[in-house]
Image: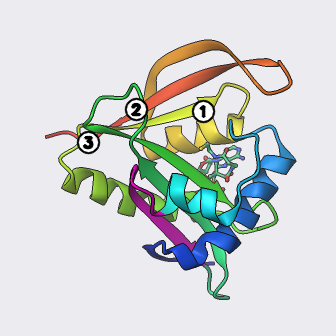
Amino acid sequence: MSFAIRPVTSADAPALAEMLNAVIRAGGTTALQREFTPEALDEAYLTGPQVLCCHVAVGDDGALAGFQTLGRYPGLPADIGDIGTFARVDGKQRGVGSALFPATVARARALGHSAINATIRADNTGGLTFYAKQGFVDHGVTRSAALDDGTLVDRVHKRFALGA
Ligand SMILES: CC(C)(COP(=O)(O)OP(=O)(O)OC[C@H]1O[C@@H](n2cnc3c(N)ncnc32)[C@H](O)[C@@H]1OP(=O)(O)O)[C@@H](O)C(=O)NCCC(=O)NCCS
């Protein structure tokens, strides 16, 4: 399947909240653990003031297959945005995340950023492999960050250099 990539709008929020909440309920990947209302998702990751860009991938069937967001994150330098990528857990298609990445890179470059940060749970092998495949390299590790149930999981920080 091929995907059309376009900027998100607030009208996408209900479908994307459903998609992200299914990823959260499945567990074991994203560091996000609490489900989002459409309004909260819109504010945090789609069109809110901390969002630098967010794009959706639309499949041949017209359904939303995933989204990728770039935002400001506390503790990161002003010229480094934080990326998040989510694809439908029920989707059999691959290539959603890769199809979204060029649009995010283009926006980060247009902003004059030096790099993109990705923070991934150390047990999220799919996420780690996905970002490595895009060209992200290891930047650091935050040891033993607690999940809501008290489980301690390292967080891996990866960076994609945007160059001059
Ligand atoms: C991570 C995620 C966004 C990848 O989306 P995707 O559309 O499946 O990614 P792509 O098909 O574009 O993957 C590109 C490459 O990444 C790697 N990859 C992606 N998912 C992988 C997985 N689950 N296991 C191992 N490698 C994986 C592969 O090398 C793949 O290349 P290939 O198809 O040639 O083998 C998706 O699995 C997802 O939504 N996961 C849950 C949320 C999450 O963990 N997000 C990342 C942290 S923000």
Secondary structure, mark 3, is: loop
Residue linked to disc 2: 159
Mark 2 CB lies closer than 8 A to ligand 1 = no
Residue 26 at what x, y percent from top left? 85, 48
Give me the C-alpha separation between circle 3 and circle 1: 19 Å
Secondary structure, mark 1, is: strand
Q: Is residue 83 magenta?
A: no
Label 2 Cα neighbours within 10 Å, binned few <14 / some 14-19 / many ≥20? many
- Amino acid type indicated by mark 2: Arg
Give the mark nearest the N terminus, 3 or 1: 1
Q: Residue at x 62, y 65 (%)?
A: 66
The answer to the question of whether label 3 and label 2 lie on touching residues, with beta carbons closer than 8 A, is no
Mark 1 CB lies closer than 8 A to ligand 1 = yes
Residue linked to disc 1: 120
Give me the C-alpha separation between circle 3 and circle 2: 9 Å
Q: Residue at x 75, y 66 (%)?
A: 18
Residues in magenta?
47-58
The answer to the question of whether label 3 and label 1 lie on touching residues, with beta carbons closer than 8 A, is no
- Amino acid type indicated by mark 3: Leu
Residue 14 seen anywhere in this rendered image of the structure: yes
Q: State whether residue 162 is above or below residue 41.
A: above
Residue 126 at what x, y percent from top left? 69, 41
113 left or right, relative to 149: left
Principal SS element in the magenta part? strand
Tag of residue 162: 3
Q: Residue at x 68, y 36 (%)?
A: 31
The answer to the question of whether label 1 and label 2 lie on touching residues, with beta carbons closer than 8 A, is no
